[in-house]
Image (cartoon, rainbow, N blue to C red):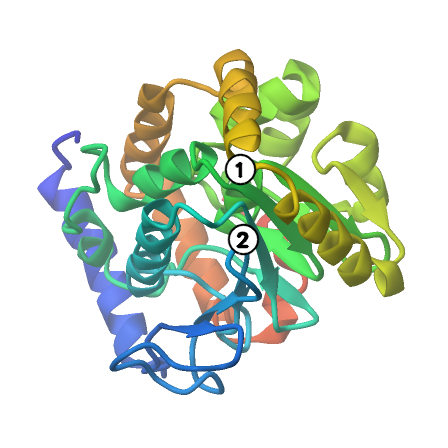
Amino acid sequence: MKVLSPSRAAILLAISAALYCSTQTFAQTTKAVDGTGTQSQGAESAATAKIRLTRKNAAYWEVTFNNPPFNIVGPAEVRDLVKILDEIEADRKVKVVVFDSALPDYFMAHYDLLKPLTDSTEMTPGPTGMHPVPDFMVRLSRLKAVTIVSIRGRASGIGSELALAADMRFASREKALISQFEVGAGFAPGGGPMARLPRLVGRGRALEILIGADEFNGELAERYGYVNRALPDAELDGFVDALATRIASFDRQTIVDTKNLVDLASLPSDAESQTGWDTFLTSVQRPGAQARVKALIEKGLGQSGEIESHLNQSTAEFKE
């Protein structure tokens, strides 16, 4: 990982620490549950888990984000996701995993910008040798199991990046809003969308999504290829469940063989993901990014539904 400028890191750390101390955070921890609701050893109840792992049956698992009010993901949630990923990798029976949200308005808002930067930079690298964020995205994309993301509500920043790292994406036509807002906030995205979006939507549209930094509703996201398809909201859950159930009924080794060949033809190299994270860390410490992030936090970033529901608009309102 690149060596960070101590002076820049100190400035951002001071801002983040002060804001963090004045902001309430949730003290929940992740747990896994099986299809009957049985808790894993030492886990919290399902009602308070930030991320729920449900084994609908041996072949079909579901990961549900439940971190109100915005499903924001920071270092603690990344660690929880990595633990769930470890379970998926270790189980030779699972064939399909669906990622969804318990919150109707937010699939996943964005990465937690209220935490001190060192909370992220000091995380232990994952099995790939990369930081846990790019490590998670790479490992998610290379799972033997098929991964499906069901998007209802806002999927911004790392929410969009997780969806892009999965195998398939389905969105609510009326309620999904997907974006990479980061350039508007003065820094580069860190979860690998520069490596994945051009392969999905083409270079021009990838640049529009990333540098335009505006939001896409389900219908436009489908037209661009950002998602597989957009469905009427009332049909989204049933469609995703039926597709996952169908895949779970197939032979696992045939699924694995087919997915491996598609991966060879379509996935970016692991190095591209690490480069994206390094670029994020460098860019978020620049004075311009610090000024923009500070202005967003003062408006209520990570704390107010007013700013979170108009994030893409608010990033364009900053005056130098």
Kind of residue at badge 2: Ala
The residue identified by callout 1 is 252
Label at residue 314: none
Where does the image place residue 275, in percent across and percent down from the top left?
A: 32, 25
Does residue 234 appear to the left or right of 50 in the view shown?
Answer: right
Residue at screen point 34% across, 23% down = 270
The residue identified by callout 2 is 59
Where does the image place residue 291, in percent across and percent down from the top left?
A: 39, 51
Does residue 61 appear to the left or right of 13 in the view shown?
Answer: right
Residue 215 appears in view: no
User: In the figure, residue 190 lies in which quadrant?
Assistant: top left
Residue 143 appears in view: yes
Q: Nearest the camera: 168 or 309?
A: 168
Check disc 1 and report its element: helix, strand or loop.
Answer: helix
> Where's the N terminus, which quadrant?
top left
Estimate the spatial distance between the alpha carbons at disc 1 and disc 2, rounded to whole Å: 9 Å
Q: Are marks 1 and 2 in contact (CB under 8 Å)?
A: yes
User: In the figure, residue 87 lies in which quadrant?
Assistant: bottom left
